[in-house]
Amino acid sequence: MCIRRLLHPSSLHWAWRTTVLKGTWRRQQGTHCWKRSGGSTYRAVIFDMGGVLIPSPGTVAAGWEVQNHIPSGTILKALTKDGENGPWMRFMRGEMTTEGFLEEFERLCSEIAKTSVPVDSFFSLLTSEQVAKQFPVMTQAISQIRAKGLQTAVLSNNFCLSNGKSFLPLDRKQFDVVVESCLEGVCKPDPGIYQLCLERLGLQPSESIFLDDLGSNLKAAASLGIHTIKQVEDPETAVKELESLLGFPLHVGVPNTHPVRKSMEIPKDALEKYLKDLLGTGATGPLELLQFDHGQSNPTYFIRLADHQLVLRKKPPGALLPSAHAIEREFSIIGTPFYLMEYCPGIIYKDPSLPGLEPSWRQAVYTAMNQVLCKIHSVDLQAVGLDNYGKQGDYFPRQVRTWTKQYRAAETSTIPAMERLIQWLPLHLPQQQRTTVVHGDFRLDNLLFHPEKAEVLAVLDWELSTLGDPFADVAYSCLAHYLPSSFPMLRGFRDQDVTKLGIPTAEEYFRMYCLNMGIPPIENWNFYMAFSFFRVAAILQGVYKRSLTGQASSAMAKESGKLTWFMSDLAWDFAVKEGFHVFKEMPATKPLIRSLHTRAGPQSFLNPTGVRSYSSAAEASYEAKGGLIISPEGLSPRVRELYDRLRHFMEQHVYPVEPELQRHQTSVERWSPSPLIEDLKDLQLRTWCCLQQAGLPYLATHCRKEDCSGPVLICHTEFLGEESPSATTGHVPGRFIATTVLVLILEKAKAEGLWNLFLPLETDPEKKYGAGLTNLEYAHLCEVMGMSLYASEVFNCSAPDTGNMELLVRYGTEEQKACWLVPLLEGKIRSCFAMTEPQVASSDASNIEASITEEGGSYVLNGHKWWISGILDPRCKLCVFMGKTDPQGPRHRQQSILLVPMDTPGIKVIRPLTVYGLDDAPGGHGEVRFEHVHVPKENIVLGPGHGFEIAQGRLGPGRIHHCMRLIGYSERALALMKTRVKSRVAFGKPLVEHGTILADIAQSRVDIDQARLLVLKAAHLMDVAGNKAAALEIAMIKMVAPSMAYRVIDRAIQAFGAAGLSSDYPLAHFFAWARALRFADGPDEVHQQTVAKIELKTPARLQESAAPRL
Ligand SMILES: Cc1cc2nc3c(=O)[nH]c(=O)nc-3n(C[C@H](O)[C@H](O)[C@H](O)COP(=O)(O)OP(=O)(O)OC[C@H]3O[C@@H](n4cnc5c(N)ncnc54)[C@H](O)[C@@H]3O)c2cc1C
């Protein structure tokens, strides 16, 4: 037999021993009393409430004070102030209303703390369901006491709530007698209240045991002759003491078990016989068999035989999926393979948010978890003979293959996110740094904790263990951080404030791990998270498939089908983030991995056969070729067609109206949007709608109809105009329909649909919001838009809206998307991004000082910003605001981003700023003050502390869009210059025949083509390797493009003569923008710094020995 002791510290045997009790005890049948031989008899146990059955006010106060920065001990001092005449005791005796008490108590606390103390918040916490919960060990003890025929009572100093009801968050049915001070008008330690309780119990003092956490209350009870137990630290210890006084066990059976489910029964007789043979003569008596609540895939049983306590783990019955239940490795004896372990009693924290524990305890639990993982990963494989436990190296490639295979074997329908992940993961495999034992299912509820210390006693569930990349375990242990608390199978806490709970954030957990292991911080942990969620999704799909054949051991199994979708979406979110985050400062610890061979595997962009396919989008599926497309001719037919249509549209509609737009921009009405632009946008929007209707991507949002959970198509009927008077919004629950009128006008509109082209396929793989172009494809189109300063807005592709829309797509909640993204995508509103501040060097975003503080249910913003593009536009309804929520936090976790409606009181635009005298109306660039601007808490994006990360991600794609447009500005300038120099004559010959002009034209062509190649390379790298891997190229092009454009435009202006500086031509305006873009989205020097840093970390291309010697 294989009995495996997983962890065996001596402390393991702390366990309560039902057989080893002090003294000899016997049950006096019929009299319902328990008597120690030669001693007294007990007939009742009386419990205090706060501090015995539920957490004490003092304990709750201690945690609350830390969280709220209130001097420690303030509440406790106020509770005891003035003894029985103090507000607390008067409140307990029901002499004060809640409001009266809170008022007086707040005054008292504030006096003690010498600062304002929000007592209301403490009181809400104290009385909240989350905190005022009976300790399970006490519930078990009470039921055992009553089962033995003894009475139970609760004797509580409690109070009345504002609804008039007394505060007693207990099931009253557990007690024969309930005595509440606030109803009796008398409090402990007044002897009267004990006597009242005894009277109601009908007992003498010596017949009862009283548990309380306060010495004075116990003293009073003892002086009456009642036996007392002081509950000092935790309820477990008090229950043990009570157990020894009463003489019978108070723990109910084995925690976390239930009777064996019918479908999971095992042949008990055969097992009993086998165990008796195995364990020898001592193993007599009936075999007790229970099933653990744990163990979805391999059912797990508790066995008690005589004084042996064992755990048996076996395969589920029925036909199994390939290698999901590798128990054969262990042992097979009773028909079904199984293995046995010694039972190790301890606590399993099933809820990873650790309710009822103090923040410091939670922190300690997660630290212990992290440490034990480091221990597992530090095992010397050779020394313990585990070097053949699994294959060495290539862990992730194998895992991705294995779980893809498992998923395929269990697949019941096509899940788009899974399809994308199956494509994406092999292309983003990290290089494996270390090979260690990998647990494979390392999460909090697979750890057995010491009940009194934050110490891991055993690690459970090793069936997925092997040798591999340890980061897989680290990421897997952070799943709960991203799952909601309502998630049925793997509970999480993403909807709770981890900092308040005391739980390290996922990033902190990763850092803690790296620190404990003495290794540099992990850079690409989004990959590991994406893989972890992918794997769970594959596992859940397996559970679901088995539930269909009746094999899964959990009643929840059938639910798991839906959960697979949820998990795979989460996984894809991380995949998207991995590609999205572009950090301007590369950490010094790790050189950027730019080995495209490694990252992209055999399908790298260097390999012409490499194909990235987002095949989930049914008929709209499009395969982006792996090759770098350097000219529009290489674009796929669909994109080429878009490109041609865009050029055509520019020629037909945009260039001809430029003079009029230019006039408008310098006229007195310039602060109102030009009607012309609005007309052009309408035209685009109409065609876009029609394209969507035609089976091209839909803009979808969740249906707002109460009776429908499906998505609803948003048709922009108000934009359809006279031609389609009967057009209505199509609505069928759960799917899209197209209205007849729209379909009829489709063919006409198909030739135009040029709207929201900017959203990269990577961000919007379902093409829910945009046209589904890759960055590379968009680069070609964006260059065309750059030929006119007005064009990008016409196609709803202008900054800062594009960055803000991308931010909302990636990080926004469904509500935020519905509120802001939809109108932005529709072009109905505009937005701005407020980061830069006059008083600090904002090139370094960590310098910003604007504050975001919490006040009641809202955030309050205060700050001074400038250069906020677009804020003056009357259509600007949203300000994406960056400020600091935690100025003391780690440098890049201090900032948060909030969505601020522009009509919120307190936003004061001081003045428009100008660029070389141009004010860029109607959007402008505003200097603004935010004074006590109140914003609802739900307007935060991604939660507190994520501002820096989001801002960096937001600017990454935005930067390259500017560069794409700058190529367009330059091409236009060169085109204008060529025309001009051919038509003007100076000194007897056309300008074009002068050598300097020729040189300028040649130089401009070279400059533009060089820069374009770099733009395209950066865009392509973003597509094939992710934004992060393209950080160097993005920084390089942002460094190169503005000054290149500025030089090319300057040459064109020079060739134009003075006219070049006038507003008769777009050159001066182009020039001003190119110059401004040497600052906007970060000045050149910051990008130079990034390039240099990365270059210095990149291994030399030249062998040192081959370098010339000086
Ligand atoms: C037209 C325009 C539109 C803009 N729109 C917006 C907007 O919508 N929202 C917004 O928040 N901001 C906007 N900005 C502001 C822009 O992002 C900032 O101007 C830019 O980040 C620089 O910050 P700063 O002006 O505070 O310069 P500083 O941080 O004060 O820097 C000044 C100079 O210091 C030098 N410097 C800085 N860092 C380094 C370094 N690491 N190495 C060497 N030298 C260095 C550079 O020469 C730099 O130009 C806009 C700016 C312009 C010109």
Image: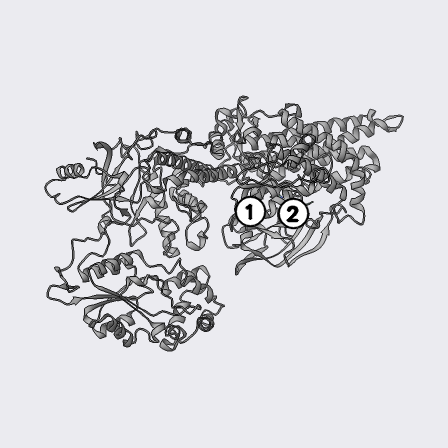
Q: What residue did someone put label 1 on?
A: 705
Asked which secondary structure carries label 1, the reply is: loop
Task: Work out which residue is located at the far right of the displayed protein and give it.
Answer: 988
Residue type marked 2? Ser
Mark 1 and mark 2: span between their CA atoms?
28 Å
Q: Nearer the viewer, mark 1 or mark 2?
A: 1
Relative horizontal placement of residue 52, taking residue 1034 as reference (left or right) = left
Q: Residues within 10 Å of mark 2 (few under 14, many from 20)?
A: many
Which of 891/89 is in front?
Answer: 89
Q: Is residue 205 left or right of residue 796?
A: left
User: Where 491 falls versus 743 (above or below)?
Assistant: below
The quadrant in which residue 468 appears is top left
Q: For the C terminus, which image quadrant?
A: top right
Between 261 and 530, which is closer to the camera in this rendering? 261
Q: Please, is residue 855 above or below residue 158 in the view?
A: above
Image x and y of residue 40, in percent: 15, 67
The circle on residue 831 is 2
On screen, residue 698 versus residue 687, left or right, reads left
The structure residue drawn at horizontal position 55% and vertical position 21%, both measured from the top left corner, is: 608
Q: Position of residue 986 (x, y in %)?
A: 88, 29
Quadrant occupied by the N terminus: top left
Secondary structure beneath dot 2 equals strand
Task: Using the rendered view, name the quadrant where residue 413 is placed.
Answer: top left
| Residue 1054 location (% of width, % of height) | 80, 34
Q: Residues within 10 Å of mark 1 (few under 14, many from 20)?
A: few
Q: Are marks 1 and 2 in contact (CB under 8 Å)?
A: no
Q: Of the two numbered discs 1 and 2 on the same chain, state the one appearing first in sequence.
A: 1
Q: Nearer the viewer, residue 79 or 970?
A: 79
- Classify 323 as above or below 117: above
Query: Picture coordinates of residue 385 (x, y %)?
Result: 27, 32
**Mark 1 within 8 Å of ligand 1, using the beta carbon:** no
Q: Amino acid at mark 1?
A: Lys
